[in-house]
Image (spheres, rainbow, N blue to C red):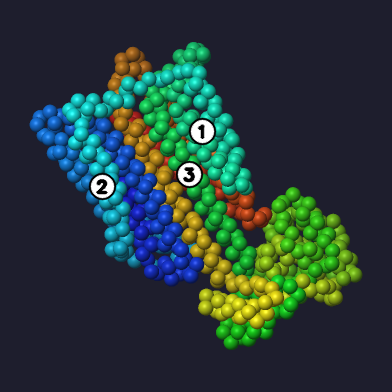
Amino acid sequence: MVYFVTVVMAAALLYAFNGLIFSQEIHTLSRSLSNFRLMLVLASIVVVCVFGWLVSYATGFMLSRRGRELGTYLLIGLTNKQVARLFFLENLAIGGCALVLGTVLGSLFYQMLRAVLFALFGMPYHFVLTLSLPAAGLTVLYFALIYLFALDRGRKRIRKANIHDLIYTDRVNQGAVIQTGRKLRMMFVLSIVLGIIGTALMITPVLALAVMGGGCVIFALFGFFLSFASGVPDFFDKRPARKYQGQNLLIFRTLTAKLATIGIVMAVISVIFTATIISEGAGLVFRGLFESRAAESGCFDLYLGSEDDTPLSEDYFDYIRASIPVEQSLRYNVYHTGDSRVLDYVEESGEDYFRYYEQDPVLRYSDYAALRAIAGYPPVELKPGEYLIHCWSYLGEYLAGFPQPISVGGAQLTLGGVHTEHLMQDYNASNGTQFTLVVPDNAAEGLPVHHYAYAAKTVQPVTEDQFYGLYWIHHRLEEQDLTRSYDTIRAKAMEEADAASWTALSAFPLFYLALALTMTAATILTIQQLSETERYRRQFALLQKLGMARREMGRALGRQFAIYYAMPAVPPVLIGVPFILHLAHAPEPGVMVGMSSPRVIVLISLGIFFLIYAIYILLAYTSLKRSVLPN
């Protein structure tokens, strides 16, 4: 049942994302979504391979568990060809039912994804339950490839098998013994060392070293699970007092016996979980990065800035007057003080600050007040003899302690306050790189102009055609004067649309892949655990006869269950968390803050992963406890 439900969910996911691939309304949301289909197709190919492995593994596992039944069919006179056809059609029927149910459920999933995308772009959403024939057709094609490949292998295996092979196929792994020895102990220690080295290399900025680190991590996980089954008995042999303490003997003997036969499977699952946690974390990092940058660069409905002290061309303003209705606007200058006292102080903050300006940037107070009004912020007061600092939030507390006073335009000014709203302070021709000084108008008289700028509040959001109309003017000006610097053009609507597009292009495929990987790995773990139901039942029946209380048996089962499910999940957490923290700290300071701060991203990533994982654990534990513990 767990396998069947997962296959239904797999069909639902494939159909939902195929619906996004063929949806015309999704691709008309923004020009930046031109590569959205390609990203989803590439992600779907990986997901099909992952689900194909699940179906292939589960089909082979069921074949080994039902070998005695199928061998009996041969014994009573059926041919290998008939038994193979029976097995093939039976599993094909299961896959067909899962496909039908998954398509129906996928229609709801598609509406959920559609609602999320519309919310990203700030568009109104209306629920419309429809069936996309191209999406359904592609889903059927994916399922046909998955099932035909997996079932064809099983059919060939049955057609070549004899009665003995089928009847005793479920005992193949029972001959595996737990080997001990110096080489395996060395492998266990080496895997731990490789895991630490690989994790450290993965967070280096050098791509080649990061790839090498990923290889070390994979080798470490395989070495760990292949050697763990031998390391536990060796550990308890040297510590006999712990072996017979409480339920240790029962728990670890059963666990190591299991790992001795599925060590490779556990290693593969651990690798999958590592990829899952990293995918979820990366998706959240990209979402936070794009949203934070869009909030800063798109704080004005429209912004223009020159890269040097050349005034902005009047062609821009002719186009704005003719094509873009403006409610409020301001043409102003960004000055610099001629020294770099505040810049030097910011660089001493310990943050990895990028120094775009050579001197401290300055705004006149009247211009600053007008910019706040255009952006929709409440007014602030500047008292005589004071100056203000407007900066990114991460610098606010630090700059509040700047040594006072400063000299600007011959006036001695003391700090009157620090403000941290978004004010177009990125790395282009902006209002200072992450900070600017706001001084009285008379103090700014005579200061050198760093660049010219324009900000406006428009009646309606700037459209794509209007935005690219301004870019066409800039392109034409560049052709006329090859020495002209690159002007900055920003529009809130375009920044938000680009952020939504890049979030969709990165986060959607990553979460799609993460969900598929989590379900696949958790299903295989659960199949392996629930397949031991009969053996557990016999084991606990014997323990009951020996006098063990039911409560104690339940405690032993719970501990064994917890260790079994924790083993493939703990190494990925130890590997994935440092990687996500490094990735979240990679952007410039002040970008990953609030709900996108590195610690919050780690917590959310682990929360999503363990929420899905816990569902499978709870289902398996409830079923196993009810089935194996004696009444």
Q: Which mark is residue 148?
A: 2
429 w.r.t. 170: above or below: below
- Report whether residue 293 is seen: yes
Q: Is residue 372 left or right of residue 230?
A: right
Whole-percent x, y for residue 497 in the image: 52, 67
Q: Secondary structure at mark 2?
A: helix
Q: Secondary structure at mark 1?
A: helix
Q: Nearer the viewer, mark 1 or mark 3?
A: 1
Q: Earlier in the sequence, mark 2 or mark 3?
A: 2
Q: Earlier in the sequence, mark 1 or mark 2?
A: 2
Whole-percent x, y for residue 188 in the image: 51, 26
Whole-percent x, y for residue 391 in the image: 72, 61
At label 2, the amino acid type is Leu
- Report whether residue 622 is seen: no
At label 3, the amino acid type is Ala
Quarter occupied by the N terminus: top left
- Discs 1, 3 touching: Cβ within 8 Å: no
Q: Residues within 10 Å of mark 2 (few under 14, many from 20)?
A: some
Label 1 and label 2: CA atoms lie apart by 34 Å
Residue 338 vs residue 152, the one in the foreground:
152
List the residue tagged with mark 3: 275
Label 1 and label 3: CA atoms lie apart by 15 Å
Label 2 and label 3: CA atoms lie apart by 27 Å
User: Which residue appears at 39% of the width and 62% of the height?
Assistant: 20
Q: Residues within 10 Å of mark 3 (few under 14, many from 20)?
A: many
Quarter occupied by the C terminus: top left
Q: Nearer the viewer, mark 2 or mark 3?
A: 2
Q: Is residue 405 left or right of residue 484?
A: right
User: Which residue appears at 59% of the width and 35% of the height?
Assistant: 197
List the residue tagged with mark 1: 220
Q: Earlier in the sequence, mark 1 or mark 3?
A: 1
